[in-house]
Image: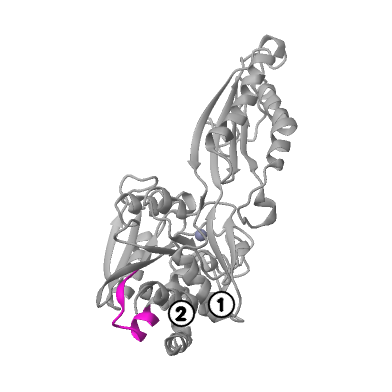
Amino acid sequence: MPLLEELNRRIDDKTSDLVGLTVDLIRIPTINPPGDAYTPCAEFIGRRLLSRGFQVEYVRAHDTPGDSDRFPRTNIIARREGRAPGKTVHFNSHIDVVEAGDGWTLDPFGGDVRDGKIYGRGSCDMKGGLAASIIAAEAYIEAYPDFFGAIEISGTVDEESGGFGGVAHLASKGYFSRPRVDHVIIPEPLNKDRICLGHRGVWWAEIETFGKQAHGSMPFLGDCAVRHMGSVLSAFEDELYPQLAQKRTEMPVVPEGAKQSTMNINSFHGGEGEPGTHGKPLDYSGLPSPNVPDSCRMVIDRRFLIEEDLGTVKGEVVGILESLKSSRENFNYAITDLMEVLPTMTDKDAPVVKAVSDGISEVLGRQPDLVISPGTYDQKHIARIGHLHDCIAYGPGILDLAHMADEYVGIEDMVQSAKVMSYAIHALLTEGRA
Ligand SMILES: [Zn+2]
C-alpha cells in the first residue's frame, strides 16, 4: 500500500535524526540507583515532543522509593490528538539505566557511533527503543496528519528497580487504563522480529532461622542459626529443586531453560556482619570474633509459571520449613514476603499483537516469534493496576546485551523496528474504519 511506502521512506530519511536522538539520550546518565538526571532527561524528551505538537505533562512520583528533591522521580507523558476521536496507541519506555559497571572499552555515556552501532549504557535497554518509537510516531503524524485517535509516548522512571515511581505510579493515576489508552507497546529490547506477550511470576521472600549465641569455643552451649539454615538448603536441594524441574509451562518463555519453574538464592547472611554492615567500618580487616550466630537470613527469588498459583508456590517452601520444625531439634524460622508479581500473558489474538505481527511480516518478510520474558518488566503494572491487557513488549536490540559492558544497539535494527511501529500505529488507529 502507498502509505506503507510513504512511512518507510520517511523513516529512512530520518535515520540520522534517529541516531542523533539516541546518542543525546545516552549522554544523559539516568543511572538507577540512585535515579540520576531523571528530570533533565524527561524535559529533553518533553521539549522535543512539544515541538511536534504533543501536549506534554510531567508527573513526579512523590513519596515513592528513592524520591527526594535531589533525586526526583520525574516521568513524562506526551499525547498527540488526531483530527477526530478514536483509539489511543501508547508507547512506554523506561528512561532509567543500570550502572555502567566495569569492563567498558568505550565511554558508557559517550554515545559512540561506529560500524552501524550506537554504544552506551542504555543504548539497547532501552533508549534505542524509545528513540525508535518517537521517530515512528513523528513519521506517522507527518505522513498522515488527519489521523483518528491519539498517540502517546511516555518516558518513565525506575523500571530497573521495580517501576514503583514510574509505570506503577502512573497506572494508579489512570494513565494506563481505558478509556484514556487502548493499546500499549513497550519498546524493550526483545529483538526486531519477536513480540513479547508477558512474563513469568515472581515471589521474593526472606527466610530467617534462629539460634542462641554462645562462645565459639563451646558451641554446644549455644545453637547455630547457620546450621539450621543449612538444613533448609539441603531440603531445597533434595525436595524442592527436583520438584521445580518437573514443572514445565505452555508459555513460550525464552530462553529454553526458563520454560520451567526456577528459584535463585539471592543472598545468605549469618553471624557477624561483614565490613560495612552492623557498624563495622568498610575497611575493617581484622579477625572475626568467635561467636555462635543466633540469626541467619536468606533471600529467595522464585519465578513461577502461569499454570501455578502463588498460594501453592509459597506453600511448597512453607511446607519444607514446617516439616523441619517438627523433625529438627530447636528449629525455628520466620518468613517475610518481599515482593510478589503474578504472571501475565497477553492473548495472542489481541489487536496489538496482530498489528505488530503484520508490521513485522510487511517490513521483515517473516512471521514473528511470540515469546514470554523470564523476568518481569513494566507490563505487570499495566495489567494489574491499569487493568489493560492489550499490551506487549516490542523493540529493537538484543536482549542479551542489556546490562553488559559495551552495550550497543544496531542502527538498522532501530530503523526497521521504527517502521514496524509506524505500521502498527496505522493498523491500530484505522482498525474497523472503512
Ligand atoms: Zn529495560
Label 1: state its secondary structure.
Answer: helix
| Residue 132 seen by the camera | yes
| Residue 297 seen by the camera | no
Between 432 and 81, the one nearer to me in the picture: 432
Q: Are marks 1 and 2 in contact (CB under 8 Å)?
A: no
Range covered by the magenta-colored residues: 138-152
Which residue is disc 1 drawn over? 361
Residue at figure coordinates x 43%, y 60% from the top left: 390
| 1 or 2: mark nearer the eye | 1
Q: Is residue 111 magenta?
A: no
Q: Amino acid at mark 1?
A: Ser
Q: Is residue 248 above or below residue 323?
A: below
N-term mark: 1 or 2: 2
Q: Amino acid at mark 2?
A: Leu
How far is the residue under mark 1 from the one under mark 2? Answer: 22 Å
Residue 18, numbered circle: 2
- Residue 13 left/right relative to 265: left
Q: Tag 2: Cα neighbours inside 10 Å, few (<14), some, or many (≥20)?
A: many
Q: Is residue 142 magenta?
A: yes
Residue 234 at x, y percent in the picture? 73, 29
Q: Is residue 255 above or below residue 366?
A: above
Residue 29 at x, y percent in the picture? 45, 63
Asked if disc 1 is less than 8 Å from ligand 1, the answer is no
Residue 195 at x, y percent in the picture? 54, 65
Residue 213 at x, y percent in the picture? 61, 15
Residue at figure coordinates x 36%, y 76% from the top left: 430
Q: Quadrant of the C terminus?
A: bottom left
